[in-house]
């Protein structure tokens, strides 16, 4: 009995249809492929079988892990320091900022984006450990927590394309012949969020369901306690599941080329990496009758290649004893060109924009502005999906915070993205200072953007500077001139 059987049995006894969870099994094969590219252990690319004329041996190629770089690049580009969560006013925003720090919100959102873009889909799940007075049964405190839930633990149960009405988060533990599933089922029913926390103990074909030990079996919330993180791209593998497609799924061909070219480059330029070709009669000792007796030495894979043909000199009675050392031709320029061209190909198909991972000197800010329009357009598409998901999570976190005695008003939640072309900070500041001179932005906006000050803090700072003896001192903008 597997996890899908357990879900169906639980659904049946509660008059719910969880059979669609099984559709995940067909999709897992694609996710496993994307995972292997992310880790850099693709069979036939990073691991292969060679033959040196006598025996087979394993070829291991060190991967450049381009899919890993693509997933990380997207995550850091989306969730920069300029990514902000704002509530209805500064007081509520500051409360959430403190909660952010306590639960490591930004780091976990970034981590979830990396895994989600690598495997197609991941989730962030909020929960709370609530402390109560055993005598009065009143809440005395607690702690809000945020977990990154990867693809393997996600099981959509009731859904219509991307609209999920019920989902299960499942962890599995094996104890001898018993499998223990810890299951949290989140469902939307009549405008309320219902969370069922259960433990399923499976032994053979028998399964027993019990309420989770630390929480009630069923709880009601006003807000959703999880968010789905995935790329907002067309999924070529299925149009019926709420799962996303790995961000680099369309870039696997150039990823192959890059890893193979990098392996060839290492092989050619590796110091002392010469190959020796030897005749078979040099490898094996023979008696006067030409019969094989014993090997002269062990044939080291990848170093000695046996030439199977036996050549004869003059009258054909004397065998030529073949022995030759070859140092591969250095083809660094050709390999580097393959790597550079394939990097651009991979970046374009992954939506990053040409040159995002190129091995060239850093482009100027002007060049970046003119060459990254495609990347920024793709970035905006991802933001459109993520914004709604993160707002749901923020509201859920604030509800949990209120349950442990720290209420936060999340009636209004705004997500602010950094949608300008990403250039170095110094160049950004110079452009902003020019915009101040042209009246495009205010000094207050400048300080809020680069110093992280609130509107009140920036205004107070500027007013204080205005009272100083030198009103023309540009330090009022910050220590950047």
Image (spheres, rainbow, N blue to C red):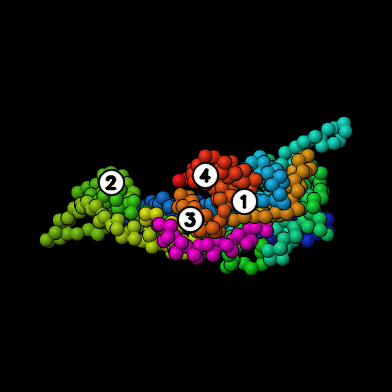
- Badge 1 marks a residue whose secondary structure is strand
- Image location (x, y in percent) of residue 467: 57, 41
The residue singled out by tag 2 in the image is 271
Which one is closest to the eye, mark 4 or mark 2? 4
Give the label on residue 84, or none: 1
The local secondary structure at tag 2 comes to loop
- Between the C-alphas of marks 1 and 4, the distance is 32 Å
State how far apart marks 2 and 3 are (Cα). 52 Å
Q: Residues within 10 Å of mark 4 (few under 14, many from 20)?
A: few
Residue 182 appears in the rendering = no
Of residues 138 and 376, the one nearer the viewer is 376
- Looking at the rendered image, the disc whose residue lies closer to the viewer, 1 or 4, is 4
Say above or below: 327 vs 30: above
At horizontal 34% and vertical 51% (from top left) the residue drawn is 266
Q: Is residue 262 left or right of residue 101?
A: left
Residue 434 marker: 3
Q: Seen from this angle, which residue lies furthest top?
A: 135
């Amino acid at each position: 009995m597997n996890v899908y059987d357990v879900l169906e049995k639980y659904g049946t006894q509660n008059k719910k249809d969880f059979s669609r969870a099984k559709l995940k099994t067909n999709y897992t094969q694609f996710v496993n492929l994307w995972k292997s590219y992310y880790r850099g252990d693709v069979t036939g690319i990073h691991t292969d079988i060679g033959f040196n004329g006598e025996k087979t041996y394993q070829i291991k190629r060190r991967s450049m892990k381009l899919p890993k770089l693509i997933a990380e690049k997207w995550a850091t580009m989306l969730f920069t320091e300029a990514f902000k969560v704002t509530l209805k006013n500064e007081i509520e925003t500051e409360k959430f900022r403190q909660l952010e720090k306590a639960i490591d919100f930004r780091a976990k959102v970034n981590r979830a984006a990396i895994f989600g873009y690598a495997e197609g889909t991941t989730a962030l799940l909020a929960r709370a450990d609530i402390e109560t007075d055993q005598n009065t049964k009143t809440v005395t405190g607690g702690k809000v927590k945020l977990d990154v839930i990867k693809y393997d633990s996600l099981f959509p149960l009731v859904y219509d394309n991307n609209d999920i009405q019920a989902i299960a988060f499942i962890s599995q533990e094996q104890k001898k012949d018993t499998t223990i599933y810890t299951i949290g089922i989140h469902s939307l029913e009549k405008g309320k969020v219902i969370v069922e926390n259960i433990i399923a103990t499976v032994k053979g074909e028998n399964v027993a369901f019990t309420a989770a030990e630390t929480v009630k079996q069923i709880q009601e919330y006003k807000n959703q306690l999880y968010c789905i993180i995935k790329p907002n791209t067309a999924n070529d593998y299925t149009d019926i599941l709420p799962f996303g497609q790995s961000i680099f799924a369309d870039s696997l061909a150039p990823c192959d080329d890059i890893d193979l070219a990098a392996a060839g480059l290492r092989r050619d330029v590796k110091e002392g990496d010469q190959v020796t070709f030897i005749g078979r009669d040099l490898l094996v000792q023979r008696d006067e009758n030409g019969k094989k007796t014993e090997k002269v030495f062990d044939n080291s894979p990848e170093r000695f290649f046996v030439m199977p043909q036996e050549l004869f000199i003059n009258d054909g009675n004397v065998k030529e004893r073949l022995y030759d050392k070859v140092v591969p031709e250095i083809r660094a320029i050709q390999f580097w060109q393959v790597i550079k061209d394939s990097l651009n190909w991979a970046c374009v198909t992954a939506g990053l924009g040409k040159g995002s991972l190129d091995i060239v000197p850093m482009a100027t800010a002007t060049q970046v502005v003119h060459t990254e329009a495609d990347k920024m357009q793709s970035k905006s598409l991802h933001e459109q999906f993520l914004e709604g998901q993160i707002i749901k999570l923020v509201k859920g976190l604030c509800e949990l915070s209120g349950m442990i005695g720290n209420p936060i008003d999340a009636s209004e939640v705004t997500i602010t993205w950094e949608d300008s072309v990403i250039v170095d900070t110094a160049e950004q500041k110079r452009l902003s200072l020019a915009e101040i001179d042209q009246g495009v932005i205010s000094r207050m906006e400048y300080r809020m953007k680069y110093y992280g000050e609130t509107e009140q803090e920036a205004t107070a700072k500027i007013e204080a500077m205005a009272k100083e003896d030198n009103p023309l001192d540009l330090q009022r903008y910050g220590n950047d001139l």
